[in-house]
Image: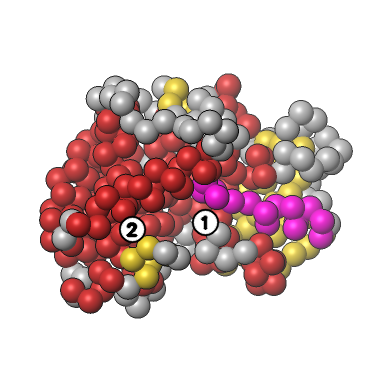
Amino acid sequence: MNSRLSDVPSHSWLGAPIDARPLFAPEQAALMAMLRGLAPADWGKEAVPGWTVRDLAAHILGDFYGRLARDRDSHQNGPAFTPGETLEAFIHRINQEWVDAHRRVSPVALTDTLDLIGGQIVQYFEAADPNSPSLGVSWAGIDPAPMWLDSARDFTEFWTHRQQIRHAVGQDTDPDPLFLSVVLDTFIRALPHTLREVAAPVGTQIQVQVDSPAGGTWTVTATGDRWSLAEPDTGPPAAVVRLDGETAWRLCTRGIQPDTALARARIDGDRALAEAACQIVSIVY
């Protein structure tokens, strides 16, 4: 699959656009197959700190409903910020409120509802205009974001939650590189924002290499007013960070901390720049 779209000049610093739309249907199918294969005891296992598998499945349903209500149906009566509340605090609060409210819903009913509403999510994203303005992506530092990044961000969230459930029930990360390659490519779009406070001469480049079938090489360049993923390679980078695929996606979702990723990484060149790049986080954290 060609996951790239034609570049959009106004967002060029984010790198070449990604087309995740064809992956929502197979991701939804993979989620449903996994949930329908769980044993009754699996639903009570911890998937992320404080949430069971059932809680995380309820959270995914909340993400589905929120997207459809806001962007398909133009529904305006959702939760609001409290005075002084940060985006991160708001997101965590409303997510917990949703999960708490759904603890009365059985796994069977929850799975059937995820199947129904997930199908509508697939239809929504497949029909989306990738170049239209959409919901901001805070970890990439852009609001509004182009729809290609917003939709790719949602794809990575659905995929990540599925991995968390897999791990909770004793399964390894899904090895399919078709999914993970798009996940990693999307997560790396956080690099320019990650480095926004890092001063370096114009033209300084940091290269991130992910060594796996789903991996690749990304180069971020200091341009004076920002770091950019759109500039051509101009020679040996000032720093190179090499990570394996599992370390890379877990770092970006804070499944592991930067110090752990650095201990696993192979680094060439400027250590300080490499360490700055490994502060990357591609979720609301």
Front residue (pair 66, 79):
79
Q: Which one is in front in this view, the residue at disc 1 or the one at disc 2?
A: 2
**Image position of 208 with respect to 116: above or below:** below
- Residue hosting label 2: 56
**Image position of 11 with respect to 173: above or below:** above
Residue at (82, 56) in percent of width and height: 272
Residue at (54, 36) in percent of width and height: 85
Q: Quadrant of residue 233?
A: top right
Q: Position of residue 282 (x, y in %)?
A: 54, 48
Q: Position of residue 1 (x, y in %)?
A: 36, 46
Crowding at dot 2, Cα within 10 Å, few <14 / some 14-19 / many 20+, comes out as many
Task: Identify the secondary structure beneath mark 1.
Answer: loop
**Image position of 273 with respect to 5: above or below:** below
Crowding at dot 1, Cα within 10 Å, few <14 / some 14-19 / many 20+, comes out as some
- Residue hosting label 1: 253
Front residue (pair 4, 164):
164
Compared across the picture, whether 234 is left or right of 68 comes to right
Q: Amino acid at mark 2?
A: Leu
**Mark 1 or mark 2: which comes first in sequence?**
2
Label 1 and label 2: CA atoms lie apart by 15 Å
Residue 257 belongs to magenta span: no
Task: Identify the secondary structure beneath mark 2.
Answer: helix
Q: Position of residue 119 (x, y in %)?
A: 18, 43
Residue 282 belongs to magenta span: yes
Q: Quadrant of residue 190?
A: top right
Residues drawn in magenta? 271-285
Front residue (pair 95, 235):
95
Residue at (37, 70) in percent of width and height: 46
Q: Answer whether residue 174 is visible to the viewer in this image.
A: no
Q: Position of residue 28 (x, y in %)?
A: 25, 51
Q: Amino acid at mark 1?
A: Thr
Residue that protrudes farthest toward the right in the picture = 201
